[in-house]
Image (cartoon, rainbow, N blue to C red):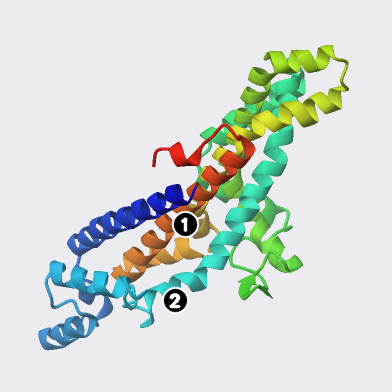
Amino acid sequence: MTVYVLRRLAQTLLVLFVTSALVFGGLFLVGDPVEILVNPNADQAEKLRAAAALGLDRSVLEQYWIFLRGAFTGDLGRSFVFGRPALDVILERMPATLEIAFLAMLISVCLGIPLGLYAGLRPADPLSKTIMAGSILGFSLPTFWVGLLLIILFAVELGWLPSTGRGPTVEFLGLQLSILHWEGLRYALLPATNLALFKLSLIVRLTRAQVREQSLLDYIKFARAKGLPRSRVIGVHLMKNIMIPLVTVIGLELGSVIAFAIVTETIFAWPGMGKLVIDSIFQLDRPVVVTYLLVTVFMFIFINLVVDILYSVLDPRVRLSEAKG
């Protein structure tokens, strides 16, 4: 396992290097941040001084080399807009993104597995057909459109939940989290629900497919033939085997929820990393955009590594030392 983890870490460094090069080069071609950050009425001399102060008077290769040297020491540059280390700006917004991502996955798992289990065990039941029809809608409806509907229904018409911003926070392990405060949880419910819809549909369909497939295998038939209670057949034998692919998918989807929370955060004005990077793209704040993507890629790779290890725990037949990177 140690060799496997070391190999994955080496691959992580390579992926981060390639990502940084592509993003850095792409942002260099988009435009000149000085034109946005400096007063439009400023003369050419003031613009040149601003470019020199931001390090933009050098070639793209020089700027990238300076970035790489700083990255090895944990310095990913200073934000053009905030005037602070870009990594600090990202880490400051990270708890807001993580809490709605985890809350969304919690909603998806807690609802998706029971609904998929029911639909798989009773495929001909009208409720099962309704569940599957709802999962198709979850796949089909655009996230931004669903978000607007949730705001209109629960915030405007019913007035049950706030539609924008982040509520009061509570400090936990050095992080400011709103979901640990009742009022803060009310603020997080709408964006988390919007973010959870697609993943909920995915888990429902995957769980149902696994239940239908496993129910036809010999070990389930043998357990029933032995006269074991239905609850034991489902809760022990069936659930143990369907959880192996479910854990893999849930782990991968957690990474994608974190990475693609941008739309939801923009709709609900949620002050997380996604909204920050959208604002930074419009302001051509290169250090923040590059740092966000590097942090997101690293989190995605780390989650995949944890999922692979959990997979080996659930299924002893898996040998991490023999797994291909």
- Residue tagged by mark 2? 88
Query: Is residue 72 placed above or below 258 in the rendered structure?
Result: below
- Residue tagged by mark 1? 299
Tell whether label 2 touches label 1 (CB within 8 Å): no
Find residue 58 and report its horizontal and vertical position in percent.
Answer: 13, 76
Observer-side mark, 1 or 2, equals: 1
Find residue 215 and report its horizontal and vertical position in percent.
Answer: 70, 17
Find residue 193 and report its horizontal and vertical position in percent.
Answer: 63, 49
Badge 1: residue crowd in 10 Å (few <14, some 14–19, many ≥20): some
Find residue 43 and report its horizontal and vertical position in percent.
Answer: 13, 86
Disc 1 residue type (three-letter): Met
Residue 201 seen anywhere in this rendered image of the structure: no
Q: Secondary structure at mark 2?
A: helix
For this view, does 299 lie left or right of residue 248?
A: left
Query: Is residue 296 placed above or below 40 in the rendered structure?
Result: above
Disc 2 residue type (three-letter): Asp
- Distance of mark 1 from mark 2, alpha carbons? 16 Å
Residue 56 seen anywhere in this rendered image of the structure: yes
Residue drawn at (38%, 82%) of the image: 84
Q: Quadrant of residue 55?
A: bottom left
Q: Secondary structure at mark 1?
A: helix
Residue drawn at (23%, 81%) of the image: 54
Residue drawn at (85%, 14%) of the image: 226
Which of 175 and 188 lies nearest the eye of the viewer? Answer: 175
